[in-house]
Amino acid sequence: MSSLTSDTELDAAAVDELRASFRGELVRPADAGYDQHRKVWNGSIDRRPGLIARCAGVADVRAAVRFARERELLVAVRGGGHSFPGLSVCDDGMLIDLGPMKGIRVDPDAGTARVQAGTLLGELDHETQEFGLAVPSGIVTHTGVAGLTLGGGLGWIQRKHGLTIDHLQSVDVVTADGEFVTASEDHNADLFWGVRGGGGNFGIVTDFEFRLVPIGPYVVAGPVFWPMKDAPEVLRFYRDWIADCPDELMTIVVQRRVPNLPVIPPELVGQHVVAITACYAGPVEDGERVVQPLKNFGTPVLDLCQPKPYLTHQQTFDASFPHGWHYYFRACDVAALDDEVIDVVAEHGSRIVSPITSIALWQMGGAIARAEESATAFNGRQAGFTFNINGNSMTADGFEAERQWARDYWTALEPHHTSVYVNFLMEEGEERVRQAYGADKYDRLKTLKRAYDPTNFFRLNQNITPA
């Protein structure tokens, strides 16, 4: 791949030619706004593309792809910019930025929504909740719809309604040669299978059509906190409590130091805690009954689990993951929360130093596990739990120590690893990508990659090389 430098007349002339037919904005390193538009969510990533193409629509996306392909440029594609390893920006090449493409059209009668690729989860929630509906999606509202969906889409109502991809009805895709195709169960079904979990390997998805589900406007949701020293007892209770819980109940276990937020009593800030955050995707009165044993267990230091608007709950973790901090993740799936896993969780949680380092242990099962395993590229539907281990710091100071903490935690869990959620990977190499999909699906994805992107034009992702 070539670089698009800023010091040749040829490059300047080429960009001017593109600009003449480009409805969006083209930003070069010397232009105002360049530093703003090249930044991504993870502040530890600092890359400088040669050209940023901020697309206003599909025509711009096609033009940008053709431009980059003709000049053999390295290409990064950004929706919301939340790629953990920063794969939504590159050095020297071309950044195709879908951020301006934020169109959302909700059809409440049909129960569907058409969503452009620059949309963020909170923006989609805002439109769908107007009608008491939602797309099952993630837990941080400034995450992009596109990247979350293409990797699978975990979220607060997944056990009742399944993954985000389980509600995807069709996609519009710009392929590596700049062609426009639509994929669904009935049209380009092979491509539709692949984009449901296979990430951005096969093209740039510009539009998504989702089937909506009813939710809210109020849900019973929120965290209950206990001192970290109580973690073994809390987790053993938790394991038993969720053993036969209804699909409407979704939980995430969190370990961290208590953040300094308006809802937190000052005397708790900085204390090591284990928290169980619940969300009940059903009637409020049923939710209050189901979560009562959680609220009654042991001696919580804080209980914020209560009826609240679904929109409010969706924002619960936003303040813990703002733009610009330094983030590092290790992840794995495990089959069960057995005593050995609980011991690892208790031990490593007590070693947290940074005020923003944490783990999230996602409860799986329910509708996720009942869906047909072979229907989509997503792998790991039979996982019991998914670990997301965050070694984070606000700046570069102390970041390496937090990264090492995350690695040590992950290594201690290694005897229990089953698979891994592809959206939680850093840049970890081909073997880890293979683990995310399993051998059979990985081989099928490689064949699909050869059909739609034989030169691996779209390579800045959790990359699947062509067969």
Image: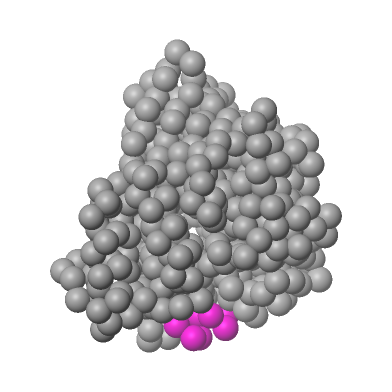
Q: Is residue 458 magenta?
A: no
Give the residue at the far right of this rendering.
440
Dominant SS of magenta comes to helix
Locate residue 411 relative to residue 252 in the image: left or right: right
- Quarter of the image where the C terminus is located: bottom right
Which residue is more in the foreground, 65 or 379?
A: 65
Percent x, y for residue 380? 74, 51
* Residue 88 on image: x %, y %: 45, 64
Q: Residue at x 41, y 79 (%)?
A: 3
Tell me if I can see residue 406 in this picture: yes
Name the residue at 49% across, 20% down: 111
Residue under the image location 74 percent in, 35 percent down = 371
Q: Which residues are magenta?
A: 399-405
Spot the residue most to the left: 32
Q: Is residue 227 above or below residue 383?
A: below
**Quick check: can you spot residue 228?**
no
Count of numbered circles in the view = 0
Q: Position of residue 232 (x, y in %)?
A: 68, 62
Instruction: In the rendered view, tell whether residue 459 sits above or below residue 188.
Output: below
Q: Is residue 87 left or right of residue 430?
A: left
Q: Nearer the viewer, residue 235 or 49?
A: 49
Q: Nearer the viewer, residue 347 or 410?
A: 410
Q: Is residue 401 magenta?
A: yes
